[in-house]
Amino acid sequence: MTALSGTRVVELAGLAPGPFGCMVLADLGADVVLVDRPGGTGPLVPPAGPLQRGRRAVTLDLKSQDGLAGLLSLVEKADVLVEGYRPGVAERLGFGPQTCLTINPRLVYGRITGWGQDGPLAAAAGHDIDYLAIAGALEPLGRSGERPHAPINLLADFAGGGMLLAVGVLAALLERERSGRGQVVDAAMVDGSALLTTFLHGMIGSGLWRGGRGENLLDGGAPFYDTYRTADGGYVAVGALEPQFYAALLAGLGLTGDPGLPTQFDSRGWPELRRVFTERFAARTRDEWAGVFAGLDACVSPVLTPAEAPAHPHNRARDAFVEVDGVPQPAPAPRFSRTPAAVPQACRAATVPEILELWS
């Protein structure tokens, strides 16, 4: 028994945010059926990729009468449907919310788009970087004096998109237990990207974020919250914000009691602090510094590559990564005391009649 055991989800194939949100639901135990289109979703989503784990996949041509009928037969027995088409496309193809909720009034109809179901940009094309830009989440990212830099597609696609969708679906399922009725969940990546900046807006409002890009406490402006290159070309991450952690940082670097060192929060001395820290960290390798700071509460960590992360002792101890069909990937999260998630399985093929028999 897992947290979402017995929850039936129909997922219409798409790119990035929808598959991630449905992966989260599948990891938590939902029975997710991926409805793929003939020919698949294209080269950006490998057929057996991690985002598609934990599913059974059926292939339907939703532009045909038989394909539409197959989808609606699944909708009739499902708890959740997730689609990521532009506004109006699902309605035009015959499986919009009105149709599906008429067939199944308890259905939670999840919609994930870039711009949402309405507004001036609703019908426009876009990608992660565009949603971040409009949400005000891209401009603060990057180094001082340089152009904004997008952190791959983690923020809008996954944190502000797929995860927001999963939260919305779970909330709607919980509300359905009280009302007995389904509803539409409109998850927009631009909304989610803006939501992720809530703390930043608080800092701006309280006067704690006054500088430009890369000149503030948490954006690389402070020398005690940044990354440093090491002797072997690796990097360490430093997050020594609090005074006790900063003292441990100085101890690890051999700088305790240095009379020429500027004080921590005097930003006028930050360039000199950065110069000193840069020179010290450049004197040893990344792993040597990891050893130095292993016994110190200094908030200093080695910067691992994605390929290195599964082998880190902490990640190994928590089984934070698993191997699915020969591909190492993050394990399901969060953890549950009574209903732990199972190890994910690779996506496997099925047919609509097979699914309906299992769901009967």
Image (tube, helix red, strand yellow):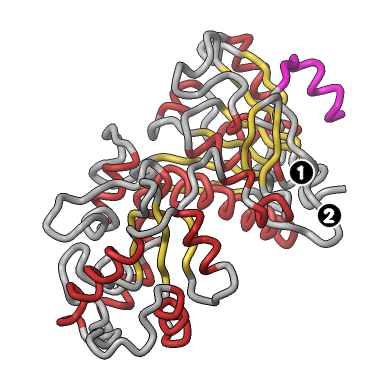
Quarter holding residue 8: top right
Three-letter code, disc 2: Thr
Q: Residues within 10 Å of mark 2 (few under 14, many from 20)?
A: some
In the picture of the structure, the residue carrying the numbered disc 1 is: 29
Give the magenta-colored segment's residue range: 348-360
Query: Helix or strand or loop: what does disc 1 sit on?
Result: loop
Specify the principal SS of the magenta part. Answer: helix
**Residue 44 lies within the magenta run:** no
Residue at 38% x, 43% y is 117
> In the rendered structure, which disc, 1 or 2, sits on the residue that comes first in sequence?
1
Location of residue 119 with respect to 358 vertically, above or below? below
Residue 138 at x, y = what percent?
Answer: 26, 53
Outermost residue on the left side: it is 145
Q: Is residue 186 visible?
A: no
Q: Does the segment drawn in magenta span residue 352?
A: yes
The answer to whether residue 240 is above or below residue 311 is below
Estimate the x, y position of residue 269 in percent, counting from the top left.
18, 81
